[in-house]
Amino acid sequence: MALPYQELGVNLPAAIAQATDRQAAMFRAVTTLKEALPHYSWVGIYVLEGEELVLGPYLGKPSPHTRIPLNRGICGAAASRKATIVVDDVNSDLRYLACSIETRSEIVVPILLGDLVLGEIDIDSDQPAAFTAADRALLERVAAALAEQMRPRRT
Ligand code: SME
């Protein structure tokens, strides 16, 4: 199946698979998405460490939410449910933790290896209801590619 969004200019899942390590893979995902898609106002990846989501690479305004417990925010909800959450109007969602007053909508896509949560892709938009089925399909493919790069390895 073709990837949504020709504007990406690259096959992002393939580029992630070719990255040298997980850090490079996460940076590649964040920079490509932020640069290619103007409705993505803030793009970041949280990595699950114990019971907290810890902010990794991101582009956009600095967020006060650098560590989010699993029982807080839309981020915590998506990781706990192990499912994508799309919020068309963040101001009417009681779970929402604000990062910028301009933000109107959000999508959070867990990075899953089977049943194991490794982290998540979090994207905010300054436009209401900015995220469609195309965004979800793209980001779930990107998350699957990231999961392979973030796979825990035995040392
Ligand atoms: N809005 C998120 C918090 C992260 S900031 O948007 C970067 C939430 O509600 O979990």
Image (spheres, rainbow, N blue to C red):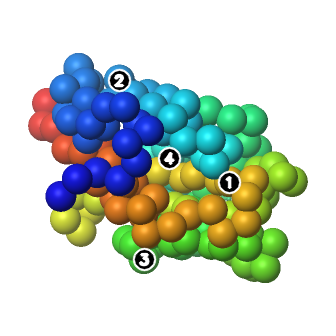
- Location of the N terminus (image quadrant): bottom left
Residue 51 appearing in the image: no
- Residue at (42, 62) in percent of width and height: 134
Provide the residue designation for mark 2. 24
**Is the CB–ligand 1 distance for label 4 below 8 Å?**
yes
SS of the residue at dot 4?
Answer: strand
Which dot, 2 or 3, sits closer to the camera? 2
Query: Looking at the image, is mark 4 or mark 3 earlier in the sequence?
Result: 4
Query: Looking at the image, is mark 2 or mark 4 earlier in the sequence?
Result: 2
Query: Looking at the image, is mark 2 or mark 3 earlier in the sequence?
Result: 2
Q: CA distance from mark 1 to mark 2?
A: 24 Å
Mark 3 crowd level (few <14, some 14–19, many ≥20, 10 Å Cα): few
Quadrant assignment, res 80: bottom left
Provide the residue designation for mark 1. 125
Which dot, 2 or 4, sits closer to the camera? 2
Provide the residue designation for mark 4. 46
Mark 1 crowd level (few <14, some 14–19, many ≥20, 10 Å Cα): many
